[in-house]
Image (cartoon, rainbow, N blue to C red):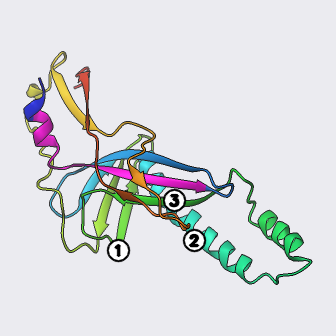
Amino acid sequence: MFVEAIESVDQFTRPIYSLTRTYGGTISGGTGTMFFVNGDGVAVTCKHIAQLIIQANQVNETYAKFSQERKNLKQGGKYWEALAELEARYNYTPNSLIQIKLNYFKAFDTVSTMQLHLHGTLDLAIIEFQGFKEKRYNTHAEFVNNKDLVKQGRYLCRLGYPFPEFTNYQRTLPLPLGLSVSRIYKLPIEQTNRRY
C-alpha cells in the first residue's frame, strides 16, 4: 500500500542510533528518527532526541574528567577509599549514566558540530549539522503548499525507527564504548490523518 511512499521518504529519513553505558557496566541501545528538510544538513527530530544529543556531550565530558582523576589516584592501601570519595563527588552509582555514543547512520561522512533548536512546548527540534564534507541523504522533504490536500480520513505514511532497543550493533571491547551499525530496519507507521 505504501511501497512508493516508503521508497520516496527513505531518501531523506535517517535513524539516530544511540548506545548508553552505566557505571555498573550495563549497555543499552536506542533508536530515534530524523528527516532532512533541505540540502544544507538541516533535519527535524523529536525534542527528546535532541535532548539526548545535548546530554551525550555533558555525560561524556564528565566521565572523561572522572577517568582522568581516577587514573591519577595513587595505587596502594588508600586507593579504594580515594576511589569511593571520587565516585561520591561525581555522584556515580552502578546505575549512573557515564557514556552515550551516537551514530547518525548514513547521513554524513563526518560531523564536527551542530546547532540544536528545541521547541518550547512540543516534542519537536531542529538539528543543523555542520562541518560535513559529504551528505549521504539523497533529497529532502517537500511540504504541501495546498492545505486542501490534507483532509480528515486521508492516510499518511510515516517512516521511522520506533524501537527503543536494537541489537544490530557491535561493541568495541575493551571499553570505551564504540558503535558500529551495519543494517537499519525501517518501519512504516500507518496513521489516519485527523488534523489539519
Disc 3 from disc 1: Cα separation: 17 Å
Furthest residue to the top?
A: 153
Q: Which residue is mark 3?
A: 100
User: Looking at numbered disc 1 in the image, what kind of residue is underneath it?
Assistant: Ser
Is residue 188 a member of the stretch shown in magenta? no
Residue at (42, 60) in percent of width and height: 179
- Residue 98, above or below 164: below
Q: Which residue is mark 1?
A: 112
Residue bounds of the magenta highlight: 5-21
User: Looking at numbered disc 3 in the image, what kind of residue is underneath it?
Assistant: Ile
Q: Residue 64's quadrant in the figure?
A: bottom right
- Tag 2 secondary structure: helix
Residue at (33, 40) in percent of width and height: 161
Q: Earlier in the sequence, mark 2 or mark 3?
A: 2
Residue at (67, 58) in percent of width and height: 23
Disc 2 from disc 3: Cα separation: 10 Å
User: Looking at numbered disc 2 in the image, what kind of residue is underneath it?
Assistant: Glu
Between disc 2 and disc 3, the foreground one is: 3
Residue 90 percent location from the top left of the image: 74, 65
- Residue 10, above or below 24: above
Q: Earlier in the sequence, mark 3 or mark 1?
A: 3
- The number of discs equals 3
Residue at (73, 76) in percent of width and height: 70
Q: Which residue is mark 2?
A: 61
Residue 151 percent location from the top left of the image: 15, 21
Question: In the picture provided, is 107 more to the left or to the right than 115?
Answer: left
